[in-house]
Image (spheres, rainbow, N blue to C red):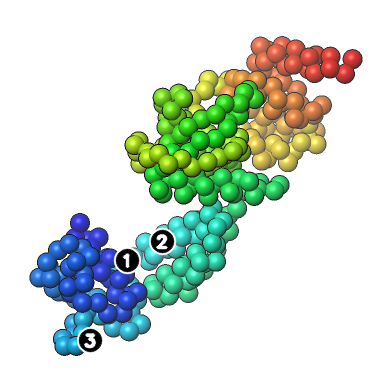
Amino acid sequence: MKINRLFEIIYLLIEKESITAKELAEKFEVSTRTIYRDVEILSLAGIPIYMTKGRGGGISLLPNYILDKTVLTDKERENILSSLRAVQTVDIADSNSKQELIQKFSSLFGNSYVDWIEVDFSSWHDYKDQSNIFQIIKSAIFNKKKIKFEYSNSKGEQTYRKVEPLKLCSKGGSWYLYGYCDKRCDYRFFKLMRIKDLTILNEDTIHIAPPKILTTENTFKQKCIHIKLHIQKEMAYRVYDEFDNFTKMEDGSFISEMDIPESEWTLYYISTFGPYCEILEPNELKEKFKDHLEKTLSIYK
């Protein structure tokens, strides 16, 4: 598209300072006449672009040029810098070069960059393995290559998978790989923490990721149940962190409610509150939790 070509011409000139119409024509696979028309359009738009003839001549921008509001609004500039900052926080490799890139764009926009946010999606424990997996998958996605790895599902079952990696996604504080699984012949999410022995294969991918994977709907389709818990004040910090719907009682305890997947994991989650939590509803969950506790106690008899 022409608009993309115009932007690329600006960025090439910022980087190279001067370039000939012939070089631009070859790069964009258009005629030199088209490049001259592009230069005229940019000039009419207020971009200080000019051409010089003769030996050493070419197309250039005036020194110290910055992108003004005829090209990008203040909001668009802020969004670009914020996006670059987000990329830096999730892509641990070569972080210094990305910081330099942010500073360059800040100078290009004529702004003094405000370093207003810092995000770290890693956990508090050692995350080097997950970081390495992140980088390997990213490389496979960029190079359109399949990967293979050992994967442990929620039941602890281990299988080897060959997958076409399509996107890295963050949801609920965890990182996931979204890709096409050869074993299941379908698209699947894989939690990065459960991936081991990851290898890039010399096999090309053929599937393409949709523009939007994570939506406002429940991405991970699973039946949920509504639970009501009575949580003691000793667990107040968890109530504030983990529940949107709760009522604080006069004694400092809480009546907390939430929708939660109907699975064995629900029993594990409730047990993490120890003696500071009582299930109020539903009754079926109470009975399941009693059985869960009895089986746990039987281990120590």
Kindly identify the residue that appears in the image at 45 percent across and 57 percent down.
83
Kindly identify the residue that appears in the image at 25 percent across and 60 percent down.
4
Q: Is the residue 288 above or below the residue 90 in the image? A: above
Kindly identify the residue that appears in the image at 42 percent across and 69 percent down.
105
The amino acid on which the numbered mark 1 sits, given as a three-letter code, is Leu
* Residue occupied by mark 2: 80
The reply to whether dot 2 and dot 1 touch (C-beta < 8 Å) is yes
Helix, strand or loop under label 1: loop
Nearer-the-camera pick, 143 or 167 = 143
The residue positioned farthest toward the bottom in the image shown: 55
Give residue 16's position: percent from left, percent from top: 32, 76
Q: Quadrant of the C terminus?
A: top right
Residue 164 lies left or right of residue 279; in this view the side is: left
Kindly identify the residue that appears in the image at 29 percent across and 75 percent down.
13
Give residue 152's position: percent from left, percent from top: 61, 29
The reply to whether dot 1 and dot 3 touch (C-beta < 8 Å) is no
Q: For residue 56, which numbered disc appears in the image?
A: 3
Nearer-the-camera pick, 279 or 289 = 289
* Residue occupied by mark 1: 72
The amino acid on which the numbered mark 3 sits, given as a three-letter code, is Gly
